[in-house]
């Protein structure tokens, strides 16, 4: 869904940046070490749409949480964020490592948001199941084709 929305935004002429939460943090850490943090923050604030994928895949340390908060806070009411996560909002305190920062992030993210809660089977697992079924249909158990 995030990729489709990103591609549609691009087709409409919106500058769009798609990045995993992990890669966003890695880039911000590197920029901080190189003394280019402000420039990197600006690169994440500039696009009309910033897509942050896989939030919650990894826990953040306090420094990383502050980096992510800065991106979200600087984009707040300036540009759209599309964020994907398999974690509930109640789990964000654990992911972020600080419930206060998590609450501040969620406050900004949810203020003007639309939430899509997708339940059900993963499309990847569904595709695999369908491929496996087709393969089994071609070669029923006990039959071998040469």
Image (spheres, rainbow, N blue to C red):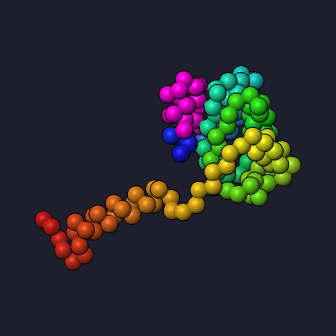
Vertical relation: 100 (above or below) 108? below
Q: Residue furthest left?
A: 146
Whether residue 67 is visible, yes or no, is no
Whether residue 3 is visible, yes or no, is yes
| Residue at 77% across, 33% down | 76
Q: Position of residue 128 (x, y in %)?
A: 39, 60
| Residue at 64% across, 40% down | 82
Could you tell me how many numbered marks the image carries?
A: 0
Residue 146 occupies which quadrant of the picture? bottom left
| Residue at 68% across, 45% down | 114
Vertical relation: 124 (above or below) 78? below
Residue 133 occupies which quadrant of the picture? bottom left
Q: Position of residue 95 (x, y in %)?
A: 74, 53
Vertical relation: 50 (above or below) 118? above
| Residue at 76% across, 49% down | 96
Q: Position of residue 100 (x, y in %)?
A: 87, 49
The one nearer the camera, 118 or 141, is: 118
Stretch of the chain drawn in magenta: 5-19
Q: Residue furthest bottom?
A: 142
Judge whether residue 12 is colored magenta. Answer: yes
Judge whether residue 20 is colored magenta. Answer: no
Please give left or right for residue 143 compared with residue 54 in the image. Answer: left
Please give left or right for residue 46 compared with residue 140 in the image. Answer: right
Residue 131 occupies which quadrant of the picture? bottom left
Please give left or right for residue 106 compared with residue 146 in the image. Answer: right
Q: Residue furthest right?
A: 100
Please give left or right for residue 107 compared with residue 80 in the image. Answer: right
The one nearer the camera, 27 or 45, is: 45
């Amino acid at each position: 869904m995030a990729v489709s929305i990103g591609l549609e935004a691009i087709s409409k002429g919106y500058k769009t940046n798609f990045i995993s939460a992990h890669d966003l943090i890695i880039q911000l850490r590197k920029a901080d070490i190189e003394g280019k943090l402000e420039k990197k923050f600006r690169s994440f604030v500039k696009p009309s749409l910033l897509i942050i994928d896989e939030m919650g895949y990894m826990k953040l340390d306090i420094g990383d949480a502050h980096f992510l908060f800065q991106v979200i806070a600087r984009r707040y009411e300036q540009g759209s964020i599309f964020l994907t996560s398999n974690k509930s909002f109640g789990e964000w305190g654990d992911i972020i490592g600080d419930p206060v920062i998590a609450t501040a992030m969620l406050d900004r993210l949810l203020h003007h948001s639309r939430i899509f809660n997708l339940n059900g089977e993963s499309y990847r697992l569904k595709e695999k199941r369908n491929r496996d079924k087709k393969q089994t249909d071609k070669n029923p158990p006990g039959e071998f084709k040469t």
